[in-house]
Amino acid sequence: MNYPGVIKLGQKPLVDEIKCIGDGLCVNVCPARPNVFLMEDVSRVVHPEACVDGCTECVDNCPTGAIRIIRF
Ligand code: SF4
């Protein structure tokens, strides 16, 4: 249930666009619907609200360490 003025705790990924090589692995492993990422020249976080609490798949699979999770 949502309460006005109460902020839901959660998490979201941040992509380092310098480190991202655009391989799309984060898009492929992300279980969220809608997918948190959209692949352009680099990976963009387009649906941070969909990020699944406790998931670290994108971080675990990124070969360049370009993604980190922010918890709030
Ligand atoms: S942590 Fe999981 S749900 Fe969140 S963006 Fe990464 S792969 Fe998707």
Image (cartoon, rainbow, N blue to C red):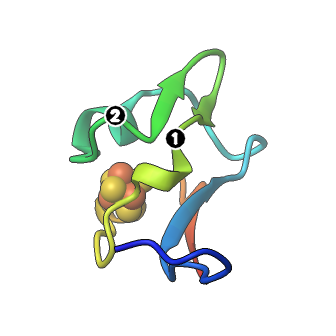
- Look at 34% across and 36% down and name the residue there: 25
Please, what secondary structure does the residue beneath circle 2 have?
loop
> Compared with residue 31, is residue 10 higher up or lower down, i.e. above or below?
below
Q: Quadrant of residue 12?
A: bottom right
Residue pointed to by mark 1: 47
**47 lies left or right of 59:** right
Can residue 61 be seen at all in this image of the molecule? no
User: Residue at the spot x=64%, y=27% of the render?
Assistant: 42
Q: Which mark is residue 16?
A: none
- Mark 1 falls on what kind of element? loop
**Would you say residue 40 is visible in this rendering?**
yes
Residue farthest toward the front in the current orientation of the protein: 4
The verdict on label 2 being within 8 Å of ligand 1 is no
Residue placed most toward the observer, 7 or 11: 7
Classed neighbour count for the residue bearing mark 1: other residues with Cα under 10 Å, few (<14), some (14–19), many (≥20): some
Asked whether the beta carbons under mark 1 and mark 2 sit within 8 Å of each other, the answer is yes
Q: Give the spatial CA distance, label 1 vs label 2.
A: 7 Å
Residue 14: % across, % down: 64, 57
Side of 29 relative to 72 (left or right): left
Q: Is residue 25 above or below residue 12?
A: above
Question: Which amino acid type is shown beneath numbered disc 1?
Answer: His
The residue carrying pointer 2 sits among few (fewer than 14), some (14 to 19) or many (20 or more) residues within 10 Å by Cα, namely: few
* Cβ at disc 1 under 8 Å from ligand 1: no
Badge 2 is on which residue? 34
The quarter in which the C terminus is drawn is bottom right
Q: Nearer the viewer, residue 71 or 18?
A: 71
How far across and how far down the image is residue 24, in percent? Answer: 41, 28
Q: In x, y percent, where is residue 27?
A: 36, 34
Q: Quadrant of the N terminus?
A: bottom left
Residue at x-position 60% and y-position 83%: 6
| Quadrant field for ligand 1 | bottom left
